[in-house]
Amino acid sequence: MPHPTLRIIREEHAALAAMLRSIPLLLAEHRRRGTLPDFAALRAMLFYVDEFPEQRHHRLESQLLFPKLRARTPLARELLDRLDADHACGERRIRDLEHALLAFEMLGESRREAFERDAQRYVEFYLAHMGVEEQEILPLARRTLTDADWAELDEAFAANRDPLTGHAPEADYRAMFTRIVNAVPAPIGLGATA
């Protein structure tokens, strides 16, 4: 039987990947048109990354999933350490990107290229990070964790669902998620399951 945690992680990764991939597309389209992007929508997207994946999703991985794997198998410990280090520096990375966006918004064209470059690097970093988790860590978890481990993980991940995966956002976040969904190009879409 598939474990809900695995499905939830994949759904959250798919929604985040779609949103992240849309950022360079939006920026490229505005550059092509010679227009400025919708800064409010970009701020909402970066705020979302900070609020949900950084603060909730990563916390569950680093505080529950990864320790359970370390307790069950010596395999992938260095990889888990690297992923934990990625999580630990994630807040700084997103804040740096938010600052680069603010500089672009406040100072204009002279900061466009730096923000676009920083955004592309961030997207590439994050997509690679999620790829490692899905290709290496989730299969290892499937093979090594116990039913008791899965029960605890399933409960924790189910209680903390990401609104971009189709779950109703908390009241405080509804306007932000509407803005994000409306900003993402239609071919990419959000909320699809992996």
Image: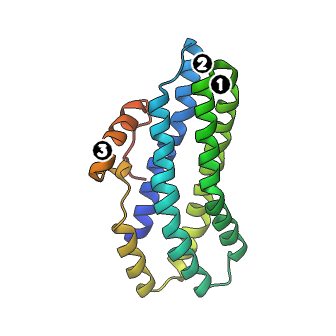
Q: Earlier in the sequence, mark 2 or mark 1?
A: 2
Q: Is residue 114 left or right of residue 183?
A: right
Res. 169 in view:
yes
State the CA–CA distance, disc 2 to disc 1: 9 Å
User: Badges 2 and 1: C-beta atoms under 8 Å apart?
Assistant: yes
Q: Give the amino acid at mark 2.
A: Arg
Farthest residue, direction top: 34
State which quadrant residue 119 falls in: top right
Please tell me whether mark 1 sits on a helix, a strand or a loop: helix
State which quadrant residue 88 falls in: bottom right
Farthest residue, direction front: 106
Q: Nearer the viewer, mark 3 or mark 2?
A: 3
Query: Label 3 belongs to which residue?
Result: 174
Vertical placement of 96 versus 102: above or below? below
Query: Coloured how?
Result: rainbow
Count neighbours of disc 1 (C-alpha within 10 A) and say few if under 14, some if 14 to 19, many if 20 or more. Answer: many
Which mark is drawn over residue 112? 1
Q: Is residue 39 left or right of residue 176?
A: right
Q: Nearer the viewer, mark 2 or mark 1?
A: 1
Q: Residue at x 39, y 73 (%)?
A: 156
Percent position of residue 76, x then y: 68, 75
User: Badges 3 and 2: C-beta atoms under 8 Å apart?
Assistant: no
Percent position of residue 28, x then y: 59, 24
State the CA–CA distance, disc 1 to disc 3: 29 Å
Which mark is drawn over residue 31? 2
Percent position of residue 128, x then y: 64, 52
Count neighbours of disc 2 (C-alpha within 10 A) and say few if under 14, some if 14 to 19, many if 20 or more. Answer: some
Q: Residue at x 69, y 21 (%)?
A: 110
Q: Residue at x 41, y 87 (%)?
A: 148
Q: Give the amino acid at mark 3.
A: Arg
